[in-house]
């Protein structure tokens, strides 16, 4: 299981939001690149980047910063936020050099387009599912749809996806740990044969241990994104990586 430190970019700075709420922003650093360096120095093997400006505007905004991170560091990076058309996909995967592009809202609204992108960029497109009570949330978490997480994922299980990234937005940034319902959803997704990455709610090393135990029994669960907990200091990248590799 891989540990993916999260770097959320808003206005060129490294921030964290509570439950995706742009009005609940905490700035943790002026330089996303320096933050990326810090996590790599602590043992991160892959980074999870979020273009929060892009999520709001519906197109990549911070790809210049992203390209700088990718070119400076020697580890793979994935990014979500504002990827709604092929131009955005190409900008990030080809121009900026990202390993994975994460699509959420557009996969729900235009599944045929997402299928086309996953076919054109095999192993590089990730399905980002933001969930609330196991239902899919869209538009940078501003709306909740009437489609379940499992139903959405099942539409794409035949594709060569890089990952399905599942975020429980009720937990994200709240420092309350991962709940049983989230673990159950992750297991269901992994048992469908999908490569699954957990996101939202990882607060202490005990959360990483729980995910690792689930991963051992359900190998499709192969990653965990950690955000606010790293910035608040309740967990370290090094400790999390050690557990994930154990």
Image: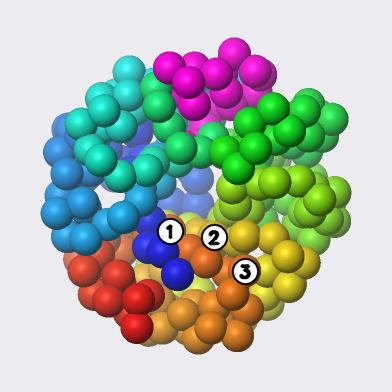
| Magenta stretch, residue numbers | 79-95
* Residue 225, numbered label: 1
**Mark 1 vs 3, N-terminal side:** 3
The answer for how far apart the CA atoms under marks 1 and 2 are is: 7 Å
Hey, which quadrant is residue 98 in on the image? top left
The residue closer to the viewer here, 177 or 98, is 98
Query: Is residue 141 rendered to the left or right of residue 30?
Result: right
Disc number lying in front (1 or 3): 3
The answer for how far apart the CA atoms under marks 1 and 3 are is: 15 Å
- In magenta stretch: residue 119: no
Residue 159 showing in the rendered view:
yes
Q: Which residue is mark 3?
A: 220
The residue under the point 77% across, 28% down is: 116
- Mark 3: secondary structure: loop
Hey, which quadrant is residue 180 in on the image? bottom right
The residue under the point 83% across, 55% down is: 154
Tell me whether the residue at label 1 lies in contact with that at label 2, contact meaning CB atoms closer than 8 angstroms: yes
Rendered location of residue 4, percent (x, y) = 38, 56
Q: Which residue is mark 2?
A: 197
Query: Is residue 58 rendered to the left or right of residue 37?
Result: right
The residue under the point 78% across, 34% down is: 115
Query: Is residue 134 rendered to the left or right of residue 218?
Result: right
The answer for how far apart the CA atoms under marks 3 and 2 are is: 9 Å
Q: Residues within 10 Å of mark 2 (few under 14, many from 20)?
A: many
Rendered location of residue 213, percent (x, y) = 50, 86
């Amino acid at each position: 299981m891989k540990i993916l430190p999260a770097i959320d970019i808003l206005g060129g700075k490294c921030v964290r939001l509570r439950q995706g709420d742009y009005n609940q922003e905490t700035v943790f650093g002026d330089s996303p690149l320096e933050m990326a360096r810090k996590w790599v120095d602590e043992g991160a093997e892959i980074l999870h980047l979020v273009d929060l400006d892009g999520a709001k505007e519906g197109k990549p905004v911070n790809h210049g910063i992203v390209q700088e991170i990718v070119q400076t560091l020697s580890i793979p990076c994935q990014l979500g936020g504002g990827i709604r058309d092929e131009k955005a996909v190409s900008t990030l995967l080809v121009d900026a050099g990202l390993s994975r592009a994460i699509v959420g809202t557009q996969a729900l609204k235009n599944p045929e387009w997402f299928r086309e992108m996953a076919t054109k960029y095999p192993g590089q497109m990730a399905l980002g599912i933001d969930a609330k009570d196991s239902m899919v949330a869209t538009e940078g978490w501003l709306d909740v749809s009437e489609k379940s997480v499992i139903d959405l994922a099942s539409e794409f299980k035949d594709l060569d996806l890089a990952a399905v990234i599942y975020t429980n937005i009720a937990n994200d940034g709240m420092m309350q740990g991962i709940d049983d319902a989230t673990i159950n959803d992750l297991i269901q997704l992994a048992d469908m044969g999908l490569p699954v990455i957990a996101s939202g709610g990882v607060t202490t090393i005990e959360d990483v241990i729980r995910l690792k135990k689930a991963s051992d029994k359900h190998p499709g669960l192969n990653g965990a994104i950690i955000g606010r907990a790293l910035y608040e200091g309740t967990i370290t990248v090094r400790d999390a990586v050690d557990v994930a590799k154990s």
